[in-house]
Image (spheres, helix red, strand yellow):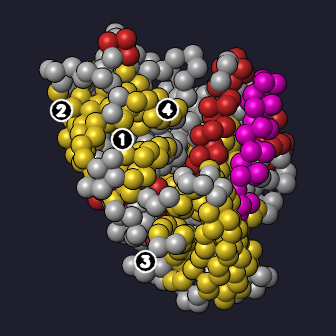
Amino acid sequence: MSIHRTFETAPTRRRRTLNGRWAFVTDPDDEGLDAGYHESFPADADRIDVPSAWNATSEYYDHEGPAWYRRRFELPTGGPTRIAFGGVCHDATVWVDGDRTAEHYGGYTPFEAVLDLEAGDHDIVVRADNTRDERSIPRPGTDWFPYGGITREVLVESVPEAFVAGIEVDYDLDSDGEDADLTVTADVRSLGESTDVEVTATVEGARGAPVAGSGEATAEREVSVDTGLTSVPVECELAVDRWSPDDPALYEVRVAVESGEARDERRERVGFRTVAVSDRAVLVNGDPVELRGVNRHEDHPEWGHAQPLRLQEIDLDVIAEAGMNTVRTSHYPNHPRFLDLCDERGILAIEEIPYWQFDAERFAREGVLDRGKKTLAEMIARDHAHPAVVAWSVTNECANEEAGVVEATAELAALARDRDPNDRPVTLASNNYHPDGDGTDRCLEHVDFVCANAYPGWYAEGEYANVLAAVREDYPDKPVVLSEFGAGAVAGERTRDGAKWSESFQADFLADAVRTARETEYVAGFTVWQFCDTRTDPRNWATRPKTKNNKGIVDEYRRPKEAYNRVRDLLTGEEGSQ
Ligand code: ADA
């Protein structure tokens, strides 16, 4: 298994990770560029782990701004070398041996550089910047903590002159879902002159997955590729076992590029299923599936965004044990290994990009829409093969009553549809129907189902039933997911009368809202705000007890609150049985 996924992704490549200790220095006055840290790194630098989030350490707990990383690595043989970053929060610049080799904006999606390097020692320097300003995504003032750092894995691997730079998996299932027509598109990147390559795509049951599908197919093509990227579609057909939440059958797609003696192979994993919507439900393989779930941040006091595999597994255990089947990855693309685990366990995911509470003025600033579009395209390119991902969410609680936001939303929704070969539904989270909201939400015209965020009874007076009815009145043909609802509870706070901030207040509140959602026929499901207590920013959220968003149904260390047990009993049918 690869370190960054739950399956092997590039078996032919000599690969190593650059995870481990790097030299590290913060740069609060942003002097490093002028001082040339990429050429002469400060001698008194500290050391830090990669991957990690510097804001999850006591030394750099509050640092917002640039910071610099450096390490050496040794290559046993020279040649084309791919250096891949899983995620650097949020603005990254990379130098190798003093040369600027990569830049990337957006902390939650990957990027890479391919260089021709000689055998021997090399020096890599990264500048990571988590400054939030008028053009940043996320924006300043988020009610969550955009940790800084190299928060996901760094890989270095040798590749041949012609190699698989990317894989797109597009398929159609026949009407009874037993046969799949597949187009596997290999993005072949060639560093040399025009050359002939043979591209082979093989599909077969995923080794090592809890449920491996049966049936297999292979197809190949010979093509001539020029220097740069060439997309090579390879088509095949096979009889398949469908993926479903109850029976999550997975397949491995192996793409090999051969040129002379050289062979490169890269793998992706896929599950065959359809996703669509009716006027009241999300349909997986044509059947309505009640979405029962949580909103989950990649947050933990020790790790922040840089979550180890074990924590990802624990979180999914906790979610599944509550009788839940859905995660909204509020509010950004999650680690792809977390989505691998969702695929394996039959947990559904709604994946989002970090347009959190943007208004038209912010969208209109130079580069802001392009940055978000790039993140959306990168997320879809990275995650479209995951059967668990059932929808793309393009915004959260933006000022949807403003014309500029409606225009931006239309562009984002169109881009998601254009880029996703599997035609998933597109959604967004609207709070216009919150009792204090602005009413009719025209952005929702551009999505397939409505995600409604509302906190009646917490931030405002009101009833969930009325919020849902107001959405339905405007969009009678679209299913509604109650995508955020919740109440704060300080873990351990118990009062005789169940006062606000106590665990019992939260438990009663959530049980009522979940019942209302489940009793409303056009409601396709619900995702509780939120899975665990999360860090927030005292500068903006001084009113949050313990500087946390305390609406978790488990605390920050995943210890269940009363609400967790209550919701679990509701969903697993044990409520009232004691
Ligand atoms: C919003 C927002 C969440 C969180 C929540 C809350 O709905 O989308 O990120 O801030 O409110 O707890 O108030």
What amino acid is at disc 1?
A: Thr
- Residue 566 versus residue 432: which sits nearer the camera? 432
Q: Position of residue 73 (x, y in %)?
A: 25, 45
Mark 2–mark 3 contact, CB under 8 Å?
no
Q: Give the Cα separation between the discs numbered 2 and 3.
A: 37 Å
Q: Mark 1 highlights which residue?
A: 151
Circle nearer the viewer, 2 or 4: 4
Mark found first going from the N terminus, 1 or 3: 1
- As helix, strand or loop, the secondary structure at mark 2 comes to strand
Q: Which mark is residue 209?
A: 3
Mark found first going from the N terminus, 4 or 3: 4
Mark 2–mark 4 contact, CB under 8 Å?
no
Q: Give the Cα separation between the discs numbered 2 and 4.
A: 23 Å
Q: Mark 2 highlights which residue?
A: 47
Circle nearer the viewer, 4 or 3: 4
Q: Going by the picture, which residue comes out furthest to the front? A: 193
Q: Mark 4 highlights which residue?
A: 103
What amino acid is at disc 4?
A: Glu
The number of numbered badges drawn on the structure is: 4
Mark found first going from the N terminus, 2 or 4: 2
Density class for disc 2 (Cα within 10 Å; few <14, some 14-19, many ≥20) is some
Q: Residue at x 59, y 40 (%)?
A: 375
State whether residue 38 appears in this view: yes
Q: Position of residue 135 (x, y in %)?
A: 58, 20
Per the rendered image, the range of residues in magenta is 400-424
